[in-house]
Image (spheres, rainbow, N blue to C red):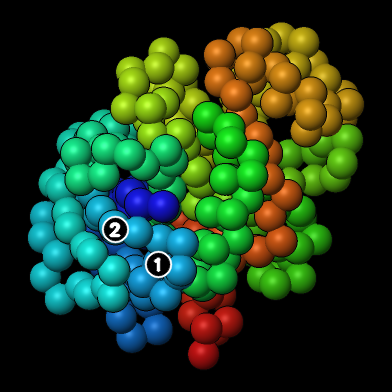
Amino acid sequence: MNVIVTAGGRPQPGDPLYPLTQGGVKAMLNVAGKPMIQWVLDALGGSSAAGHILVVGLPALDGLTCSKPLSSLPDAGDMLANIQAGARELARLDPAAQHVLVCSSDIPALRPEMVDWLAAEALKADADLCYNVIRREVMETRFPGSRRTYVRLVEGRFCGGDLNAVRQSVALGRHPAWERIIAARKNPLRQAGLLGLDTLLLLLAGRLSLPRAEQSAARHLGIHGRALLCPYAELGMDVDKPFQLELLERSMR
């Protein structure tokens, strides 16, 4: 599968990472001796499932390398615009592709076998959107004290992952739900609210299940979504705060 790597974020004053980036691009933050995004490109390059890699949001690819075909697009303004610009470019390069992987540039612990796993699961699911969910115990075992945001479902407590699969035709379209989904990506209650009041109430009561959430997404958003129970904590270990960067660096030594 071809891959969009989102890399346009620039922490602003007041952001916990601003003292480290000083207005620079977050993706280029040094992690264990090299830019954070380079760790991601190395993992994608080692994946048998990854095809063309398109970085969206960096002003240039200076010094970055990948063993797979690599190209870039400038920042289109926000995450949704970057994903859609990336999808258009990948559709131009590979019109026959059915799905595209969307990968954040701030999950430096990513490894090739994790990319292969997701690509295989997405092909089996054949959904509009395959979204990774990671159990709290998986995260806390691998990265104790990571302080992720968890949502309580019938099956347990989960956080989201930052490598997901989208049907290319859906990524290309201006789906009315995309802006709301991306805006709510860090807030489980807002996510549930997108799926209707009944879904939000079930979540608050701890009675929402993964299948029910998938059904609500189809009914309220018109998207055939599939939640994938991800066994890899690394897909959910993004860098939002300095202590998370330190935790990742210790784990990668």
Query: Does residue 242 show up?
Result: no
Residue at the far front in the pictured view? 96
Q: Residue at x 59, y 54 (%)?
A: 120
The x and y percentages for residue 190 are: 59, 24
Against 192, is 14 above or below?
below
User: Is residue 191 depicted above or below 164 in this figure?
Assistant: above
Q: Residue at x 73, y 49 (%)?
A: 229
Residue 154 figure quarter:
top right
Q: Residues within 10 Å of mark 2 (few under 14, many from 20)?
A: many
Q: Nearer the viewer, residue 125 or 178?
A: 125
Q: Residue 104's spot in the image, x, y percent?
A: 41, 53
The residue labelled by disc 1 is 44
Q: Residue at x 30, y 81 (%)?
A: 34
Amino acid type, residue under disc 1 in the picture: Leu
| Residue type of the residue flagged with mark 2 | Ile
Residue 60 falls in which quadrant of the image? Answer: bottom left
Q: Is residue 177 left or right of residue 220?
A: left
* Nearest to the observer: residue 189 or residue 48: 48
Residue 102 in sight here? yes
Indicate the secondary structure of the residue bearing disc 1.
helix
Mark earlier in primary sequence (2, 1):
1
Mark 2–mark 1 Cα distance, whole angstroms, equals: 8 Å
Name the quadrant containing residue 197: top right
Q: Position of residue 243 (x, y in %)?
A: 52, 69
Q: At x 15% / y 76%, what residue is drawn? A: 63
Circles 2 and 1: CB atoms closer than 8 Å = yes
Q: As drawn, is 104 to the left or to the right of 215?
A: left
Tell whether 154 sits left or right of 68. Answer: right
Q: Position of residue 78 (x, y in %)?
A: 27, 35
- The residue indicated by pointer 2 is 53
Q: Considering the numbered disc 2 on the image, is that residue within a helix, a strand or a loop? A: strand
The vertical placement of 223 against 219, above or below, is below
